[in-house]
Image: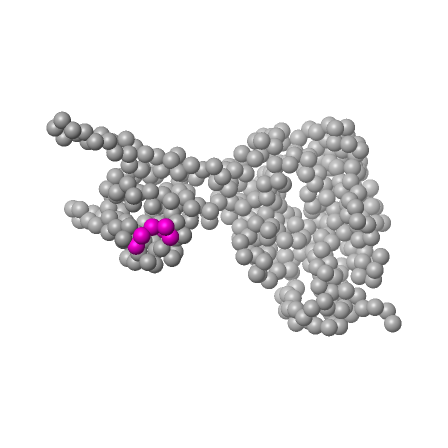
Amino acid sequence: MDAGSRFMVKAFRRYYRDRAPPLPIRFGRREFGFMFFDRSYMQRHTAFSRGEELHNLLVSQAPAHCYHSTAYYQTPGAATMEEKSWMGADLIFDLDADHLRGAEDMEYGEMLAAVKKEMLRLLDDFLFGDLGFAPEDVRIVFSGGRGYHAHVRTPEVLRLGSPERREIVDYITGTGLMADWVFPHSRTVLSKGRYSREYKDRSLPPADAGGWRQRMRAAMVSLLDDMEGSEAKELKKRYPSLQGRTVKAVSKLIDELYSAEGGVSTRENIVSSGMMAALSKKSQEMLVEMLENDIKPSMAGEVDEPVTTDVKRLIRLPGSLHGKTGLMVVPLDYDELRGFDPLTDAVPDTHGEDEVRVVMRADTEVELRGQRFALSGEEDVPAALAVHLIGRRMASMPAKE
C-alpha cells in the first residue's frame, strides 16, 4: 500500500470510528459489498444481522467504497445469486455527470450543480409529477462522487421485473414516443359538387391532456411563440431539423403562422382550436419534426437505464465515504436537496484542518468548503482537501527522504 492509500485509510477509519452509517430499511435482507484501498477486487455476498457488525467492519477495514443491494433476499449472504432467493427490489434512479451534455468541459463544482438541477427536474416532472410517487416514498442520496440516486420503496414497485422497470425508463426518456400519437392526423373530407377531397391534418393534444402529451402541447405553443418575428435563416440556425429545408419553405411556414383572418392569426387559431388545418401539409410536418427532433430531447428525463432495470444491483451505502473523493454519501429529503452543496455539506469534519503536504500531478484550481485553491508542485493543504485531492488522483503524498 502506498503512502497515499495509507493516508486515506487513516482518514476513513477516523470517520467510521466517530459515526455509524444509518442502516437501510430491511437491513437484514440486503447483500453488502466493499472495495478497499489495498485490493483490486470487490468483497461481496456479505450480510449482517446487527448494525454493530457492519460498523465493526467499517472501522477495522476502512473500505474505500461501501454498497448494499437494491434487492431483498431470503438469504442475502449466500455465495450465489440463485441461493439468495430474490424477494423484491427498490426502484432506483441514478443520475450522474455521464448523462450530461458538455460535462467534460465543466469544473467539478459546476458539474455537480448541473447534475443536481437535472435530478430536481427528474423528481418534479416525472417521479412526483407524471408517475405520482409521494415525496416521503422517495429517498434522495448524493452519491459522494458525480451525481445523485433516488430510491423508491413503495410496496407497489418492489416486485417489478426488469421489463417493467425498462418501460418506466422508456417513459421518462421519451423513448419510443410517436409523433403520430402526440399529434395525430384527423381525417377531413371536403365535397364540392361531384368532387371530394380528403385531408389528413395534424391536431394538438387537448389542453387537459397529461404526461408527455401535455408536455408536447406546451412545447408546441412555446415553439409557435418563439417563431414570431423570426427570420427564416435565423430559424434554420436555431433548429437543426430545418437544415434540410429551403429558406423559401421556412419563410412560408412563418407567413402561414402569422397571417390573419378576421383579425385572428393562424397561430391563435391552432392553439384555440387544437387543429393545424390552416397550415399546409409541409408546414405541419416541419413543426412536428422540430418538436420531435430538436425540442423533445431537452424535455426528456436523464437516468442510467442499467441501474434502474437491474433488480440485483449494488448501490452506494448512505452515510459511507466515497473512495475517489473523500466525500460523504448523503441521504437527503427533497427540501434539503434544493440547498445542498456537496463541496461544503458532504465534507466530513473528521478529516480535519491540519496541514498536510501533497504533490500535485498538475497545476490546477480546486474548490472545497467555499474556498478556492490554486495549487501546483508541492503544497501544504488542509487535511480535508488532501483527502479530496488524493482520492481524485490529482495529488499524491511526497516520497520520504
State yes or no: residue 26 in magenta.
Answer: no
Judge whether residue 230 can be spotted in this image: no
Q: Nearer the viewer, residue 41 or 386?
A: 41
Q: Which residue does the image show at 58% across and 58% down from the upper left?
A: 104
In the drawing, does residue 130 fall left or right of residue 322?
left
Quarter of the picture containing the N terminus is bottom right
Q: Is residue 145 above or below residue 29?
A: below
Quarter holding residue 88: top right
Q: Residue furthest left?
A: 193
Q: Give the main secondary structure, helix, strand or loop, of the magenta stretch.
A: loop
Q: Is residue 149 above or below residue 49?
A: below
* Image coords of residue 102 (percent x, y): 54, 57
Q: Which residue does the image show at 64% across and 36% down from the upper left?
A: 310
Quarter holding residue 76: top right
Q: Which residue does the image show at 74% across and 28% down from the upper left?
A: 82
Quarter of the picture containing the C terminus is bottom right
* Image coords of residue 243 (percent x, y): 38, 52
Q: Which residues are magenta?
A: 242-247
Check the image and tell me how it is coloured: one colour
In the drawing, does residue 67 fall left or right of residue 272?
right
Q: Residue furthest right?
A: 401
In the drawing, does residue 369 fall left or right of residue 228?
right
Q: Nearer the viewer, residue 148 or 345?
A: 148
Q: Which residue does the image show at 48% across and 40% down from the upper left?
A: 174
State yes or no: residue 244 in magenta.
Answer: yes
Q: Nearer the viewer, residue 322 or 261?
A: 261
Judge whether residue 233 can be spotted in this image: yes
* Image coords of residue 308 (percent x, y): 61, 39
In the drawing, does residue 378 fall left or right of residue 210?
right
Q: Nearer the viewer, residue 322 or 169?
A: 169
